[in-house]
Every structure is written in structure tokens, then in C-alpha cells.
């Protein structure tokens, strides 16, 4: 961000609004998805302890595990698009300029696309999830988020057998943001302390 500010201050090519847009994009693409991927992935693994053991014994599954955790508990729950021309789809009328809200979380659990979508499966043959969007709307931070998610998983799988929920069956307090799927907190305790 410092380099972006410097470019703007030197009067090169970024206006104040362009600078603001780039900073927002970096925070959303480079931070929110990663934070929620790691937090949601940790929650999913703690709820499925057999998957922790599977990863401990099969570290070659880490890349597939990241993809499955992205699908299973998507870090971004909603996206939006504007209709560019009037259209009728399955009896629904969409007018030019209408705003469509797209549920990425629901798409990633679609039983017509994913066999047993409500199960965590690190051996899923075709995992074409939409956690990072698709096409021209594909997340610029996807590669970084995957790398950071994999690094976090590598560290967590050694520690997770010693970590548990602070209170059994604790209700998770999710952030009330339409766009992102992430927790306000995940109270944990170490069994070694």
C-alpha cells in the first residue's frame, strides 16, 4: 500500500479515488478471504477430527484440503452482478440494471454439482467451487489465499489434537456481513495448558 500511496503522491497515474479503490480491493482480496478461509477451515477441522488425522497421515492432501475447505465453508458467502439486458430465465423476469445477489455458499453446496455436498471430502474428484468467483470476476488474491491457507493448515494439523472448543457445543458467533462468511471469534483452549 505504501508503494501505491507513493505513486499517487508523485502524481503518476493514480487519482485519490483509484488509490482508495485499490486499497479496498487489496483488503478484500488479500485479507478477508484468507482470514475467513483459515478461521472457517479450523472450525471445520475441529468439528471433523477424523479429517485432522487424515491430513496428519497424508500431508499430500493439503492442496485438496484447502480446496475442499473453501468449498465446504466458503469465506465469501455472497457476490452481486448487475443485469446488462432484459432477460427471462425459468419464468423470472430480470430487467436491465437489476441487481442480482449470488449465494456462493449455496452454489458450493449444490447437490447437482457436488456429490454429498454436506460432507467434507479431501478426495473429491471434481471440486469446481466458486469460493473465489469465476471468469472476469475471479479473485486476484486467490493464489495468495490458497498459499496462506495451506501454510496455516500445515502448522495447525500438528497442534489441533491439543486444541478444543473452550466450551462443548458452543454456539458460533458469525459476523453479520452479507458478503463474507466469517466468525467474530472462535474461543479455543489448549489441552496442554
Image (cartoon, rainbow, N blue to C red):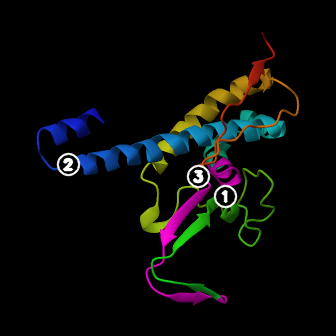
x and y percentages locating residue 74 in the rendered image: 64, 51
Q: Quadrant of residue 104?
A: bottom right
Q: Nearer the viewer, residue 70 or 171?
A: 171
Q: Give the secondary structure at mark 2.
A: loop
Q: Nearer the viewer, residue 158 or 43?
A: 43
The stretch in magenta equals 67-91
x and y percentages locating residue 16 in the rendered image: 23, 46
Q: Is residue 86 left or right of residue 104?
A: left
Task: Find disc 3 in the rendering and name its residue.
Answer: 76
Report the quarter where the N terminus lies: top left
Task: Find disc 2 in the rendering and name its residue.
Answer: 14
**What residue do we see at 59% from left, 66% from top?**
102
**What residue do we see at 81% from left, 16% from top?**
191
Q: Is residue 161 left or right of residue 138?
A: right
Q: Is residue 127 left or right of residue 53?
A: left
Report the quarter where the C terminus lies: top right
Q: Residues within 10 Å of mark 2 (few under 14, many from 20)?
A: some
Q: Nearer the viewer, residue 163 or 87?
A: 87
The answer to the question of whether label 3 and label 2 lie on touching residues, with beta carbons closer than 8 A, is no
Task: Find disc 1 in the rendering and name its residue.
Answer: 105
Residue 68 lies in the magenta stretch: yes
Q: Give the secondary structure at mark 1.
A: helix
Q: CA distance from mark 3 to mark 2?
A: 28 Å
Sequence order check: which comes first, mark 1 or mark 3?
3
x and y percentages locating residue 3 in the rendered image: 24, 36
Sequence order check: which comes first, mark 3 or mark 2?
2
Residue 134 against residue 170 in the figure, above or below: below
Q: Quadrant of residue 106?
A: bottom right
Residue 31 lies in the magenta stretch: no
Residue 93 against residue 165 in the figure, above or below: below
Q: CA distance from mark 2 to mark 1?
A: 35 Å
Amino acid at each position: 500500500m505504501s508503494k501505491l500511496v507513493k505513486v499517487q503522491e508523485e502524481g503518476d497515474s493514480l487519482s485519490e479515488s483509484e488509490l482508495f479503490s485499490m486499497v479496498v480491493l487489496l483488503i478484500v482480496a488479500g485479507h478477508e478471504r484468507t482470514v475467513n478461509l483459515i478461521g472457517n477451515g479450523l472450525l471445520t477441522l475441529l468439528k471433523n477430527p477424523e479429517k485432522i488425522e487424515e491430513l496428519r497421515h497424508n500431508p499430500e492432501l493439503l492442496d485438496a484440503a484447502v480446496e475442499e475447505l473453501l468449498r465446504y465453508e466458503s469465506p465469501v458467502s455472497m457476490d452481486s452482478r448487475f443485469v446488462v439486458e432484459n432477460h427471462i430465465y425459468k419464468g423470472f423476469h430480470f430487467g436491465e440494471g437489476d441487481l442480482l445477489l449470488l449465494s456462493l455458499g449455496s452454489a458450493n453446496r449444490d447437490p447437482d454439482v457436488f456429490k454429498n455436498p454436506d460432507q467434507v471430502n479431501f478426495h473429491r474428484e471434481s471440486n469446481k467451487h466458486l469460493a473465489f468467483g469465476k471468469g472476469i470476476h475471479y479473485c486476484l488474491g486467490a493464489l495468495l489465499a490458497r498459499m496462506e491457507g495451506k501454510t496455516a493448515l500445515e502448522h495447525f494439523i500438528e497442534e489441533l489434537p491439543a486444541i478444543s472448543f473452550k466450551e462443548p457445543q458452543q454456539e458460533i458467533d458469525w459476523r453479520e456481513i452479507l458478503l463474507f462468511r466469517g466468525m467474530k471469534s472462535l474461543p479455543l483452549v489448549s489441552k496442554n495448558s
